[in-house]
Image (tube, rainbow, N blue to C red):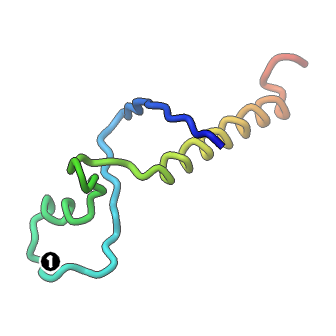
Amino acid sequence: MASNKISVVIQGTSPLMMHAYPLHQPEGLEKMTPAEQAEIAAYRDEETGELYIPAAAIQRCLVQAGTYSMYVVYVVYVVGLCGGG
């Protein structure tokens, strides 16, 4: 089975920081600045060092958005707000 690769840009309306929970609590976490704590929990590409959002999180967002959209269309139709009578 051949796989296709696509490139997309997702632009948010506000800043977003994904939090990767460490498997063990780092020593001295309470003494670290908020910026240092955020860096420990950031999702970063090992090769480039760039921040990223995990693919599973994007997939869940798209599924949830589609589910919500279908629900809204269903409610509008059932409640009779579509004007079709």
Decide which of 29, 58 is in the foreground and name it: 58
Quadrant assignment, res 78:
top right
Answer with left or right where residue 56 lies relative to residue 31: right
User: Of the residues shown, which amino acid type is indicated by label 1?
Assistant: Glu
Q: How crowded is mark 1: few (under 14 residues within 10 Å), some or many (20 or more)?
A: few
Relative height, residue 43 to residue 61 (above, below): below
Name the residue: 34% across, 78% down.
23
Answer with left or right where residue 51 lies relative to residue 39: right
Decide which of 66, 7 is in the foreground and name it: 7
Relative height, residue 10 to residue 39 (above, below): above
Name the residue: 27% across, 48% down.
51
- Residue 79 placement (x, y as % from top left): 82, 33
- Residue 5 placement (x, y as % from top left): 50, 35
Name the residue: 29% across, 41% down.
15
Quadrant assignment, res 33:
bottom left
Q: In which quarter of the image is the C terminus?
A: top right
Q: Name the outermost residue toward the front.
A: 1
- Check disc 1 and report its element: helix, strand or loop: helix
Count up the numbered dots.
Answer: 1
Q: Name the outermost residue toward the top.
A: 84
Q: In which quarter of the image is the N terminus?
A: top right
Answer with left or right where residue 58 lies relative to residue 50: right
Mark 1 sits on what residue? 30
Relative height, residue 27 to residue 77 (above, below): below
- Residue 13 placement (x, y as % from top left): 36, 33
Decide which of 31, 62 is in the foreground and name it: 62
Name the residue: 79% across, 21% down.
82
Quadrant assignment, res 26:
bottom left
Relative height, residue 16 to residue 25 (above, below): above
